[in-house]
Image: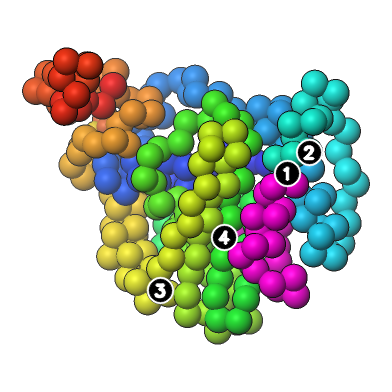
Amino acid sequence: MRTRHSLLGGSNADRWINCPPSALAEQNHPDTTGATTVEDTIAHALAEHKLRCFFHLEPKRKPVIPDEYAAEMERHTDAYVSFIASHIPQGSQLWVETRVRFDQWVAGGFATVDAIAITDNALHVFDFTYDKNTQAEAGNHSYLKLYALGAYQMVRNLYSIEKIYGHIFRPRRDHVSSMHINLDELLDWAKNTVRPAGDQAWRGEGRRKTGLWCTFCRARTSCEEHAIENLQHPIHTKDNPNSHHFL
Ligand code: SF4
């Protein structure tokens, strides 16, 4: 069973890293974005089953898939397994649906990573999002880097890691992408950006800063900075395509 994210989790990382007070401010507003859907949960269970079979890991029973989901879900999870297999050799060390902690840098920080792999001196983290309504923040690789930090914290005593790769697979949003960062860069980001932002976020301190991360912020309806930003920048329309605002 997949679990909810921590207060300073991966999915909202761009937001609390750029605007630390948003994390506590959001707690005053109900979460209407929706928990993980049944469909998403089944898809992850099926993907886990297929990955375990393909990579010869301890098997888990194939989940029961409602008929109305079956064809599409089988197709997309097959593609997900192929996507991972195209990035790592079959003999790679692989962990599936693994809880990791990045609490060395962020108090209480944890996440469930869909797949983690070690190949030679490289660490790969994979994000599989099936729910097409999941609110993905454009250009947000911060959560992948947090997942990588958690995976690194898990394996660092066992493997010599130099390179980090993060991969996003969102078949129902036609979104597939990968990023790369050296371990030194990742640890520098963790120390000098993530840790100070996390400390501020837990205390509700820091400066409110608007940006694309405001889009899904639950506190935006009561946020003065967000309101000012919207007043200063006209709403994006066909007649005014260069404008922007963070509704
Ligand atoms: S709406 Fe934007 S500026 Fe305001 S708290 Fe949320 S993330 Fe920060």
Q: Where does the image place residue 124, in percent across and percent down from the top left?
A: 57, 65
- Circles 1, 2 touching at the beta carbon (< 8 Å): yes
Tell me the residue that label 3 is attached to: 182
Question: Where residue 176 sits in the image (x, y, percent)?
Answer: 52, 47
Q: Which residues are magenta?
A: 78-101
Callout 3 touching callout 4 (CB < 8 Å):
no
- Name the kind of residue labelled 1 in the image: Thr
Circles 2 and 4: CB atoms closer than 8 Å: no
Residue 199 appears in view: no
> Which of the 4 image quadrants contains residue 203?
top left
Query: What crowding class fits label 1: few (fewer than 14 Cα within 10 Å), some (14-19), or many (20 or more)?
Result: many
**Disc sitting over residue 125 in the figure:** 4
Q: Which mark is residue 77?
A: 1
Q: Which of the two discs, 2 and 4, labels the residue nearer the N terminus? A: 2
Please give left or right for residue 31 compared with residue 24 in the image: right
**Secondary element at tag 1:** helix
